[in-house]
Amino acid sequence: MKFGVVVFPGSNCDQDMVYVLETIMKQNTVKLWHKNTELEGCTHIILPGGFSYGDYLRSGAIARFSPIMESVMKHAEKGGFVFGVCNGFQILCEAGLLPGALLHNNTRKFICKNVFIKAENTNTIVTNSIPKNKTLKIPIAHGEGKYYADAETLKKLNENGQILFRYCDENGNVTDESNPNGAIENIAGVCNTTKNVFGMMPHPERASDAELKNEDGKLLFESILKSALVNA
């Protein structure tokens, strides 16, 4: 198992992700520059948060055409693991690897704060170590985090168990008040139909270190490692 964290011009959470994977989770981890076309033998590809290409046009719209994305897309099509966080989620949606789109927050303002989410499906690679009905406190930091999908897509997402997380309050109640950006159906993360490509707006890597007094996000990385061991 080898993790590759893709770095685009404007990525600013790449080192945070590398730190969690390499130092906390003790995994073989490398950075992959966006102009490269090789994945360097990485089995698990991570697209981190940040502001790729300054978020010009739309967040993720330019990064989607970076040279490395062709290899990422081929990796995903072969069933390889791909995980996008925040800007990484936006890039995966722009690339068509995940359904839906990320729109401007309802407030039209950048939001940076802790929110609560809960796993809608605890049987995926990134959620299998999360206890059912457990609320997770995870930070968000985005200006375009409002998840949107049309009615037909939403129906399929719900039927196929593709909704990973929903925004909720600290007691696990999914309410309008607990929705920080106006995301449809409080959706905070989704996966593809084959459940090997994942995306979410909250930052689990920012909630995975005991020194930060919050390790809720570590459950996602523990899930990934657990899945890899089971499938080894």
Image: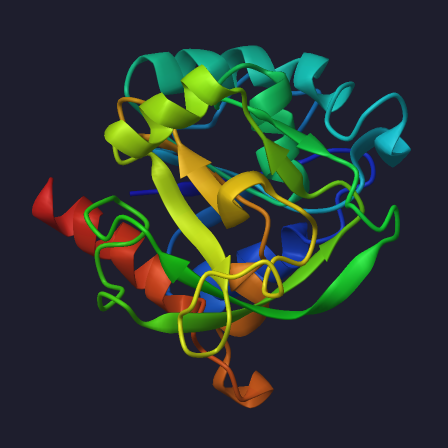
The answer to whether 16 is drawn above or below residue 68 in the figure is: below
Quadrant where the C terminus is found in the figure: top left
The answer to whether residue 32 is seen in the rendering is no
**Figure check: 224 above or below 219:** above
Left or right of 114 on screen, residue 98? left
Identify which residue is drawn at 61% across, 43% down. 183
Please tell me in which quadrant of the rendered image residue 37 appears: top right
Q: Position of residue 150 (x, y in %)?
A: 53, 20
Judge left or right: residue 88 versus residue 21. right
Left or right placement of residue 170 versus residue 101 in this view: left
Give percent across and percent down for residue 122: 23, 53
**Residue at horizontal 43 percent and vertical 16 percent from the top:** 152
Residue 99 to residue 202: above or below: above
Q: Is residue 115 visible?
A: yes
Quadrant location, the N terminus: top left
Q: Nearer the viewer, residue 132 or 211?
A: 132
